[in-house]
Amino acid sequence: MTDTSLISPEALPRGFRFAAVKAGIKPSGKADFALAVADEGASAAAMFTSNRVQAAPITVGRRHLARSGGRVRVVAVNAGNANCATGEIGITACEQVCRAVAEQFQCEGHEVFPSSTGIIGVPLPAEKLVAALPAVVSALRSDPEGFSGFAQAILTTDTRAKVAHASFAVREKMVRIAGVCKGAGMIHPQLVPSTLHTALHATMLVYLFTDAAVDPAALDGFLRGSVEVSFNRISIDGDTSTNDTVLLLASGASGVKVEAADPKFAAALTEVCTSLAKQIVADGEGVGHVVELQIEGAPNDADALKMAKSIAHSPLVKTAWAGSDPNWGRLMAAVGYSGVAVDPEKIAIWFGELPICANGGRAPEYDEKTAHAYLEQREYSIRIALGVGSGQCRFWTCDLSAEYVRINAEYST
Amino acid sequence: MTDTSLISPEALPRGFRFAAVKAGIKPSGKADFALAVADEGASAAAMFTSNRVQAAPITVGRRHLARSGGRVRVVAVNAGNANCATGEIGITACEQVCRAVAEQFQCEGHEVFPSSTGIIGVPLPAEKLVAALPAVVSALRSDPEGFSGFAQAILTTDTRAKVAHASFAVREKMVRIAGVCKGAGMIHPQLVPSTLHTALHATMLVYLFTDAAVDPAALDGFLRGSVEVSFNRISIDGDTSTNDTVLLLASGASGVKVEAADPKFAAALTEVCTSLAKQIVADGEGVGHVVELQIEGAPNDADALKMAKSIAHSPLVKTAWAGSDPNWGRLMAAVGYSGVAVDPEKIAIWFGELPICANGGRAPEYDEKTAHAYLEQREYSIRIALGVGSGQCRFWTCDLSAEYVRINAEYST
């Protein structure tokens, strides 16, 4: 059932066990309740959605991390119900599950980190999760099969499991990082550290595991840096979820102590996060084209990001991509309404290496057929040079297809 | 060919003549070049897109109004080509058309007000418009047929002409206001007065005619007030065009002088603008449902508007509407990521009169079947009370259908 080819035994970080079972929450009847366990406990850092409407597990998870000082023993994830907009009973249901998990592992309730993903506004059937607990606990294993089961169970509208890993050696000892994530719609993560409360949205759940020994404060620094250039740089539909969560756990089982800002660890973590972020876009609902936007020459980096988002959220740009239509006028419109101080006459656009627009008008070399053929590829890049300053960014997004509408307009109850 | 039932002879403002011809710009071969002429000249006020990438006619029209001090003799509109992102040759082409029109009417070039709508980034074939001039001039007429021909010729992806009118009496003399507009996609007008240059987008063209005598400064005040609560309160796809224009002309032919801030005139103008704005949404590309959003209890009116736009631009909310899916969790997510300081536990939502969400959770009276049936209507309202302050707004938007994607993803060259 589980695809163990997702990761090799060598790549799997030491110090964790995983399992998943069917608790009866997903209408499909697939596995929907998963645990990740650090038997010796793990240092933890997390980032959550900045959406002001936050699911119960976000509230509870944030509280637990604060209370435990960044220590996690068990991660408990259910898919099929987001436990969001469920009021006080949602919090109660979430805490009930955490308590039941803590009893099984004889740990504190605040050492359990909860996550939920699925429909919003429907009460979470906590009793189903509690009833499924003994089964999932007895299924825990530290091999690729356990890890792959976890990766499968957290999926909702995703079509495939998403896994990435990296490793490096320190004095002949291996340090491993592996990540697993879900997310295909309501994807425009805008994550903030667990101690901040600003406003964001979309359900993306990401779990990162390492066997390095890292203290929680250092772990938090690594996570912020890597998330900013990966998960905070993607958008499928611009809808920032109420449940977005990225959790990083460090078991220390490798015996290698990693200090704050260690460049090898930072690079490996960013590699894993970037791979997972791109996998999310590639598996987006109804996606036919994955587009890397390269913005340069903006007044500053923040403006470059603002412009990338303006383009990535334009229905007219995204539908043109769906049709492989080289209608660069729609790009110009989105550039113009982004709010960034541009000088239209300085704008240049390339599709890959093809000049499309120069000095704000059609490039002399522009050839519609060639441009159309370029956009028929599954993956490609669009570069926009504003010629104003030195701000830049990379951003990954996708087309908006009739299939996306079909998936999200289907009313089946 | 022209549907003269669009307006009655009595409702048509005096002092104007209209005509349209086929200049060969629209690939469909339909009429695509239209004139509106004020033979005695007219006071004028205009508002333009705030998109920083602006079409040549926006630049030229703004210059002409400044130069003429708010006087217009002829409005010249072409459909099928936006003359945008066409650089200096676009400006030259636009001025060439204006000069040719001015010669025909023996007026100044800056008394001609140009507009273009259609594809962006393709040079405007000015010679086709110049060649068609004698035909359109000889076709000018001051009756419903002329007006209706004008209304038809300015359309692009619209499925029907959009007209509205209002009138009131002052000492037994009639004052008439009639408006005509086009727009079905790239619709999220963010209009600013012609003297400001801020950042907006979508092609909506609106021409408002009155036979009241109003000086340009007073006219400008009326226009700003009416546009703010009508055209600046609609969105089809959130894409603000490079060409959006609203022009208001006052011929004075009624013999009634209207002073600044006259409440009767203001009310009649707002009535016409609101009707046209709603007609644009109703004729939006692929629209199956027209939704009136009523936001109340926001910290202030600006926040209420920000929230309405967050909802109106959410692909997940709009696709749920396409499927008549009462998935109010998606509304909650869009409320939460709007950037407005909300207290989730105070949020209440109604579909029409049906309670959907109360205190941030599912309303006790919520019934999914009833809610689904309500959303199957062609037009309906959604009310969201935030319970924080007294800010409010009304906003009109629509669903996002597979048909919208089909229309905009079609690549036919």
Image: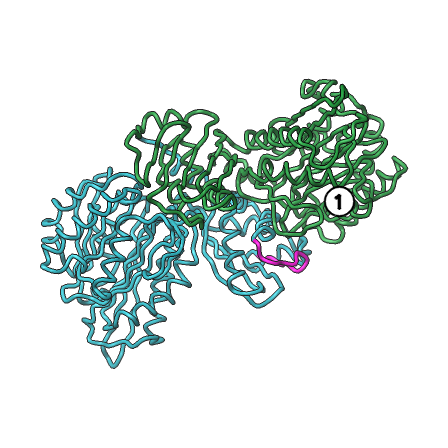
Chain colours: A cyan, B green
Task: State the residue position of label 1.
Answer: B61
Question: Above or below — where is B19 with respect to B218?
Answer: above
Quarter of the rendering containing residue A316 = top right
Q: Is residue A105 visible?
A: yes
Residue A172: % across, % down:
24, 79
Q: Residue at position x 73%, y 25% from top?
A: B176
Which three-letter amino acid code belongs to the residue tagged 1? Gly
Residue A182 pos. (x, y %): 31, 51
- Residue in front for this viewpoint, B366 or A369: B366
Above/below status of B403 relative to B124: above
Where on the picture, by quarter, is residue A181?
bottom left
Q: Residue furthest bottom?
A: A171
Residue A241 lies, with reference to residue B232, above or below; the image says below
Residue lying furthest front: B171
Q: Is residue B5 left or right of residue B323?
A: right
- Front residue of B296 and B163: B296
From the viewer's perspective, is A410 left or right of A341? left
Label 1 lies in what chain? B
Residue A291 place in picture, x, y as percent: 48, 53
The total of numbered circles placed on residues is 1
Left or right: where does residue B309 sit relative to residue A149?
right
Asked whether B146 falls inside the magenta stretch, the response is no
Residue A283 visible in image: no
Question: SS class of the residue under badge 1?
Answer: helix
User: What x and y, as percent, mark residue B201?
Assistant: 61, 46
Where is the C terminus of chain A found, in terms of image quarters?
top left
Identify the magenta region.
Answer: A339-350
| Other-residue count near label 1 (Cα within 10 Å), few / some / many at <14 / 14–19 / ≥20 | many
Nearest the eye: A360 or A324: A360
Q: Nearer the viewer, residue A121 or B153?
A: A121
